[in-house]
Image (cartoon, rainbow, N blue to C red):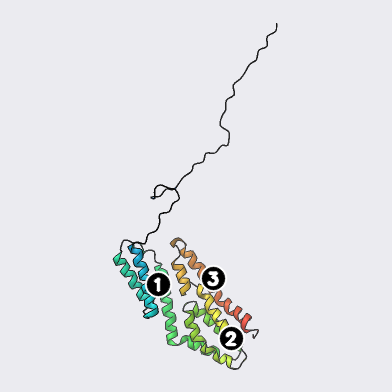
Amino acid sequence: GAGAGTGTGGTAAGPASGAAAVTVVERADDTGGHPDVVPPVRLDLARSLTLLGILSLVAGALFFDLNVGLTALTVAAVLALVSPKSAEGAAEKCAWTTVLLVCGIVTYVNLLQHLGTVDWLGEKVSAIEAPLLAALLICLIAAVVAAFASTTGILGALIPLAVPLLQDGRLGALTLISAMAICASVVDSSPFSTSGALVAANTPEEQRDYVFRSLMTWGFALIPLAPLTACAVLVLPGW
């Protein structure tokens, strides 16, 4: 007889190649150990006093004609005295270089306006016989001065000087004043103006230099471009 023998071999299961281990990290807080739960922000004494200070600043500026800068400094000093712990590090976060730079430039431009330099330039431009050239130059003056000072203030000074350009009827009053307003407004992105300075001052410190340079490049590029574009679109066609 013939005997048939069968051999059986055992199979071993090993770890599959390329398997990845995943580690899950959960963030727990102090509200019972639940992950991804943000603790609520409570209205404590310091926050309540801050809100009261902001309301006092707004009320003082609107209803009592108080100086905004001096009132804001007073409110900040009172808050620092009442809650010194919450005010720690606040002074270091202020962009003092930007503050001093803007204060110096605004003081200089206001001095020029007080001495009549801007009015003198406007009168010289108004004496130019070519109305389109005079309109371009007065828009350029509006853009240059507004990049360093108040837009409303420079418009109030230059609009009366543009009246001689409008008397002969070759330039439209609405189009010229609109062009001046546009030129004085778009340059507010300059870091030396109020709006641009606020943006630069509230930028994180590690990005402040980059934002300052970007705003300065953009704002100064608009100084020649805005008058040329506004005059070409609004003044030149004679709407």
User: In terms of sequence position, does the residue under pointer 3 or pointer 2 come before the other?
Assistant: 2
Q: Quadrant of residue 111?
A: bottom left
Q: Is residue 234 left or right of residue 108?
A: right
Q: Mark 3: which amino acid?
A: Trp
Which residue is at 33% across, 63% downward?
Answer: 45
Q: Is residue 23 above or below residue 150?
A: above
Which residue is at 52% across, 67% downward?
Answer: 214
Q: Is residue 19 above or below residue 81?
A: above
Reading the image, the residue beneath label 2 is 174
Q: Position of residue 230 (x, y in %)?
A: 60, 80
User: In terms of sequence position, does the residue under pointer 3 or pointer 1 come before the other?
Assistant: 1
Query: In 3D space, how far apart are the residues under numbered discs 3 and 2 (Cα atoms)?
Result: 27 Å
Q: Is residue 78 above or below residue 111?
A: above
The mark lying in front, picked from 3 and 2, is 2
Q: Position of residue 102 (x, y in %)?
A: 43, 74
Q: Position of residue 191 (x, y in %)?
A: 48, 71
Check disc 3 and report its element: helix, strand or loop: helix
Q: Position of residue 4 (x, y in %)?
A: 68, 11
Q: Residue furthest right?
A: 1
Reading the image, the residue beneath label 3 is 218
**Are the residues tagged 3 and 1 within 8 Å (C-beta)?**
no
Reading the image, the residue beneath label 1 is 100
Q: Mark 1: which amino acid?
A: Leu
Q: Nearer the viewer, residue 59 or 239?
A: 59
Classed neighbour count for the residue bearing mark 1: other residues with Cα under 10 Å, few (<14), some (14–19), many (≥20): few
